[in-house]
Amino acid sequence: MPSVVFPSCLFVFIRGYFKRANAQDLPQERFMNITKNLGMLVLAIYLILVGIVALFHVAIPVIVTGILALAAGILILIGR
């Protein structure tokens, strides 16, 4: 069976098995950029909190998540 390689994929299909791509092919020298848009940052915090509540059943008051959602929405709308 011939090898099939897709450059955008992380895996190479060879003879019926998946093999990991070489680390040399995937350079990761840059640092992660944190957004300077305050609305997107608040939205990210809100989504992380909602995800934690859903996965681990942690009790976070509804007023906190509501305020975060409202703040993120307003900040995104006004472009901050």
Image (tube, helix red, strand yellow):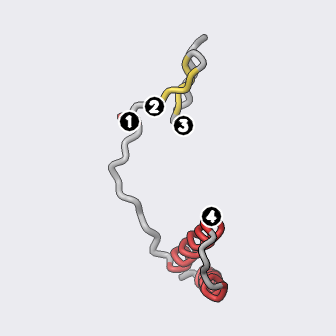
Q: Residue under label 1, please give it.
A: 23
Discs 2, 1 touching: Cβ within 8 Å: yes
Q: Give the image location of residue 41, x and y in percent.
A: 51, 75
In space, the residues marked 2 and 1 are separated at their CA atoms by 6 Å
In this view of the protein, which residue sits in the foreground, 80 or 41? 41
Residue 8, disc:
3
Discs 3, 2 touching: Cβ within 8 Å: no
Could one spot residue 37 in this view of the protein? yes
In space, the residues marked 4 and 3 are separated at their CA atoms by 31 Å
Residue at the image point whose x is 55% and y is 74% from the top: 40
Q: For mark 3, does the 10 Å Cα neighbourhood hold few (<14), some (14 to 19), or many (20 or more) residues?
A: few
Which-is-in-front pick, marks 4 and 3?
Answer: 4
In this view of the protein, which residue sits in the foreground, 15 or 54? 54
**Circle 1 SS class:** helix
Q: Quadrant of the N terminus?
A: top right
Question: Between disc 1 and disc 4, whose residue precedes?
Answer: 1
**Circle 4 SS class:** helix
Q: Amino acid at mark 4?
A: Leu
Q: Residue under label 2, please give it.
A: 21
**Circle 3 SS class:** loop
Q: Quadrant of residue 32?
A: bottom left
Q: Amino acid at mark 3?
A: Ser
Q: For mark 4, does the 10 Å Cα neighbourhood hold few (<14), some (14 to 19), or many (20 or more) residues?
A: few
Question: Between disc 3 and disc 2, whose residue precedes?
Answer: 3
